[in-house]
Image (cartoon, grey):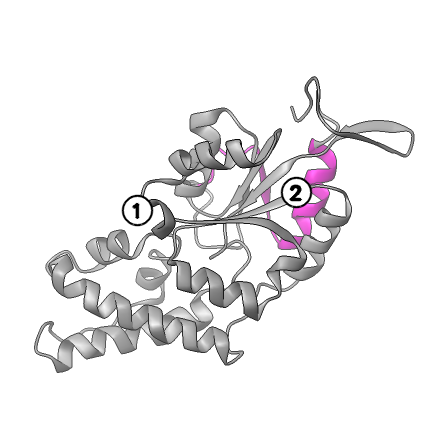
Amino acid sequence: MLAGPGLSRLRFHGRDFCMATIIFDFDGTLHDSMHIYRIALNRGYQWLVEQGLATPREFTEADMAANIGLTPHDAWARMAPEIPWSVASRAAARVGGVMDSLIDDGTARLFPGVPEMLQQVKDAGHTLVFLSNCRNAYKDAVRRAFGFDAWFSGYYTSEQFGGIPKEEIFETIRKDFPGPYLVVGDRDKDLAIARVHGLPSIGCLYGYGSREELSDATFLAERPSDITYLIEQMRFMR
């Protein structure tokens, strides 16, 4: 599945295998987003209430988790469709600012085992690419906070491309990095790249998407450490 003519190859225990460009989602795949998102969302919505622009409400954990992985516009349209984007965008900016601050002050955290998994994948010779439905400032904050340059060779965000879906952003990634490709994510919007372009994928069950949402994935990971093992299996497929 990950092999083809002209691809970079190495020998591993006497066998050939191909190097892949692995496209990682961030929130819900690498980042335990709810740890800071619940704080930021409540502050952003409270600002709307204080300005008389929204009525008080409490968000359930499931309601907040459903926003993870969406663009800010899509998240607010799903969560509070009665609030026009011209208003919601101001709250979204505050949510983003709080999240950036919580990343910078060390409150944010990756899922357990993520740094080790990224290092193992990198050490195996693969190229790691960051692709997220996030703001550029958010990407820059996590890049600094978690030392991502040690692992990632490229960064792509929805803001950078004007909010187009990931399967369209992939066209640029494909120009920048050679195949074969593997997609790793926890939401349907992540796996859409694989569906549209006929790529293998790993769905992350420990994130914020349901098993049903990830049913199209080639493989499913119960924990970040599973990703290393699954990549080891996939690279021998023909």
Q: Magenta span covers which residues?
A: 214-234
Quarter containing the N terminus: top right
Compared to 85, does 130 lie above or below? above
Report the side of 206 relative to 74 (left or right).
right
User: Residue 94 or 191: which is nearer the viewer?
Assistant: 94
Which quarter of the figure has residue 82?
Answer: bottom left
Residue 46 lies, in percent from the top left, at 21, 78
Quarter containing the C terminus: top right
The amino acid marked with disc number 1 is: Gly
Q: Which mark is residue 127?
A: 2
User: Residue 23 or 66: which is nearer the viewer?
Assistant: 23
Residue 67 colored magenta?
no
Residue 133 lies, in percent from the top left, at 39, 51
Which residue is located at x 62 percent, y 65 percent?
A: 147
Residue 9 lies, in percent from the top left, at 78, 29
Instruction: Pick whichever of labels 2 and 1 is earlier in the sequence.
Output: 2
Residue marked by disc 1: 162
Q: Which mark is residue 143?
A: none
Which quarter of the figure has residue 213?
Answer: top left
Report, in whole angstroms, how far the alpha carbon at label 2 lies from the one at label 1. Answer: 25 Å
Which residue is located at x 54 percent, y 63 percent?
A: 143
* Element marked by disc 1: loop
The amino acid marked with disc number 2 is: Thr
Which residue is located at x 63 percent, y 64 percent?
A: 112
Q: Are marks 2 and 1 in contact (CB under 8 Å)?
A: no
Spot the residue most to the front: 176
